[in-house]
Image (spheres, coloured by chain):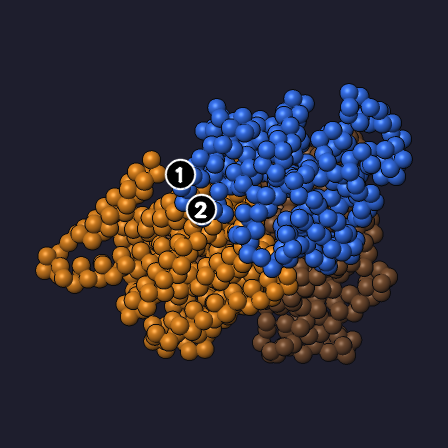
Amino acid sequence: MKLIYLLIITVLLAVCSLFVGVENVSFSALWNLDEEAWNIVLISRLPRMLSIVMAGTSLGICGLIMQQLTQNKFVSPTTAGTMDWARLGILVSLLVFTDASPIWKMCIAAAFALFGTLLFMGILQRLKQKDTIFIPLVGIMLGNVVSSIATFFALKFDLVQNMSSWLQGDFSLIMEGRYELLYISVPLLIIAFLFANMFTVAGMGEDFATNLGLPYKYVVNVGLIIVAIITAVVILTVGVIPFLGLIVPNIVSIYRGDNLKNSIWHTAVLGASFLLVCDIAGRLIIYPYEISVGLMVGVIGTGIFLYMLLRRKAYA
Amino acid sequence: MLKRKIILLILIALGLAGLYLFIHMNLQAMEYLLRTRLEKILAMFLCAVSIGVSTVVFQTITQNRILTPSIMGLDSVYMFIQTIVVFLFGSGTFVILQSDAYFFVTILLMVGFAFGLYQLLFRRGENKLFLLLLVGLVLGTFFSSLSSFMQMIIDPNEFLLIQDSMFASFTDVNTDLLLVSAVIIIALCIYIFRYRHYFDVMSIGRDHAVNLGVPYEKIVKRMFLVIAVLVAVSTALVGPITFLGLLTANLAREFLQTFRHTYLLIAASLLSVIALLGGQLIVERIFSFSTPISVIINFVGGIYFIYLLVKESKKI
Amino acid sequence: MIVAEKLSKFFGSKKVIQDVSVEVKRGAITSFIGPNGAGKSTLLSMVSRLLKQDDGIVYLDGKDVHKQKSKDLAKTIAILRQSNVVQMRLTVRELVSFGRFPYSSGRLTAEDEQKVSEAIAYVNLEELEDKYLNELSGGQKQRAFIAMVLAQDTEYILLDEPLNNLDMKHAVQMMKLLRKLVEDFGKTILLVIHDINFASVYSDRIVAMKDGQIVAEGPTEDIIQSDVLKSIYDLDIDVHNISCNRICVYF
């Protein structure tokens, strides 16, 4: 598939996304400069669309970076526990710094996510058993541990139901003024694109990378910091979107191969369009109510992930 | 030496049981208090034995010390069932949750889930235990995201009902079910105990075990199902305690420093009894029931898991 | 007697063993030689039922290996594979005792203990028998595993590269010990071995494999010939007679 077709599809989906919702917004109303229609679009629909595109793109890239760094197709923010650490971070920021600004919350969440991911990478390097399946198993268990620690605190401070809402990625509350934090991901993505090739080399291992004259630690750290901040930002503004970072890069690698140079653009665009599809479907299925995007991605993502796992021999 | 350590554990367990039975005894209500406390102790004992035994066996058949049967996804299935019931029946749920039929239906569904996994993966020929676990874990995530979606739209008062069942607790165990559970759990444990010498051989690796005439694959498959039933019964009885087994099975290995399952199985059960009794004492006397015991045990067990990963990862 | 008939094994779509038929005589040492990836270890694993073949049958004393009870089989045939990593904290004696499992099912009798002691003595590990495995050197560990196989007291012994990790002295000791087992007790030993000079000096028969097939087999002196070895290894190998042994020079 050519990138340009994928882009056109994504743009079409993005436009669709603007017109789907409880309040009817028609194209002609916008054409006639209907003030109410424009308000809806500017205050709610456009922010929603933008945040979906940014979240989808950046989570896809996050997954790609992690898979390159670990050389394991089944590692992603979900299967390495990064998401759970970020959630714990948000919880801590809520408890300790009750009236912290979103930026602060994000910083704390990102710090937790970074710590957790570094821990995972550290464990990974020391593990003898480098079984492709075993590594995500360890990661998910680590994630479960972290969320049970989070539960401990949440329960003490009566935040359990709040916390389960962070479990659910949800765009329905996104509107002007509540999503701008996501813009932080844009410069990070640019850095990710610049570093793309180095991630691949670093993934070959420290000795290999050093031999080629690559500052291994530096590259790995840049990659993980990008992953941590993006994950934290997405969870803070949208909620947890499971498996996206896992399946999108994998789908791309099926039809584009593993050369990062070829696949990174596709991953970015496919991530956005995948999330757009899920969100639009979630809005239409039980119209006028909404199925949260976290659930939609969870359901579709689980299906695709299982399919990949069971058919692993075919391509991995 | 080993026998002495076991005796020590027995004494501690008995001491704690005695303490739990007689602490803050009110002579007027003695009969009532003794009866309810004995029931609780019995529930804890059953739960402890089934979790301790199943985790030790599970770690032996997976050849891995950082795994626990709770990660098969049974916990999530249990939570999902609870959530659906609350979702459908609202505040009338309490009666249903306490009924005997519900108990058996949950067990059946959990065992059915495990059996489905088993059919899906073992029947395809090779022994793909890790794959099976990962698929279980991913399906678990899937069920949790369904549950948390429903939890979000449930009325907060009804949510409290779910929140209660999210955590194991011994405060309101259905006494009718104790006897049935006791029969099932003890029968299965005796069955497992007959294989103890096979487990000894299996712990030195598959190839050696097969060479020594152990029907390895057959035992792994059989034990997988037995473990699933044990976990299902104990979860249906008191609720999920994910990391109890991980904690006590490893403590048993550390404490005894042996491969002999005769001792490991007993010690892990005893340590689980001690953990539950001790935990329950803390919950009742220090936290005055504000924090469920499973949250405390998951907290401690989870931290121990991370410690184990960091410290032992070289050996795994 | 071990008879393999038309064995095949695939890993994925790759054929590792292709229609291999071979007979192994009793009371002799048979060495399997050949370049890396020839399928020697795979063949040994299939003969000993560790690995199930995709096609073909293995007969042990006339009976299909996969149709016998695993436990009975463990009293007739024993195998030791290359990498033996044991995570458990085990002493040498505990490890060797596992060799009696097919007889005792975990409860050792006096006779079992006796056999265990004999096996440990055979590999000269008496002084180390209460040491933990992780305290031993690579060679000592290897000998402990050999002792376990000896304690199993089987008619057939299959060893996959038993000389791994052994220094020259212990390698020679090991081969002499295997020779003695054949001569004293009439055991049948199958070896996968890389050093063709050890194969030449100590084995009765040699089976040479390449690309999943048998390319040559016969008595040792028929195989250790320049032209035969050339066809196996693609390497010019001179064979010299030195004090009644046929020694290959290929440096």
- Chain identifier of the brown chain: A
- What amino acid type should be assigned to the residue bearing mark 2? Ser
Q: Taking the image as drawn, is residue B66 in sight?
A: no
- Chain identifier of the orange chain: B
Q: Determine whether, in the image, residue A235 is placed left or right of residue C5.
A: left
Give the colour in which the image draws chain C. Answer: blue
- Residue A133 vs C219, above or below: the answer is below
Which disc is residue C104 wearing? 2
Which quadrant does the N terminus of chain B fall into? top left
Q: Determine whether, in the image, residue A40 is placed left or right of residue B298.
A: right
Q: Nearer the viewer, residue B266 or B272?
A: B266
Residue at 77% in and 41% down: C207
Which chain does the residue under circle 2 lie in?
C
Q: Which residue is mark 1?
A: C110
Residue at 46% in and 59% down: B227
The image quadrant of residue B118 is bottom right
Farthest residue in the left direction?
A: B28
Residue at 47% in and 39% down: C97
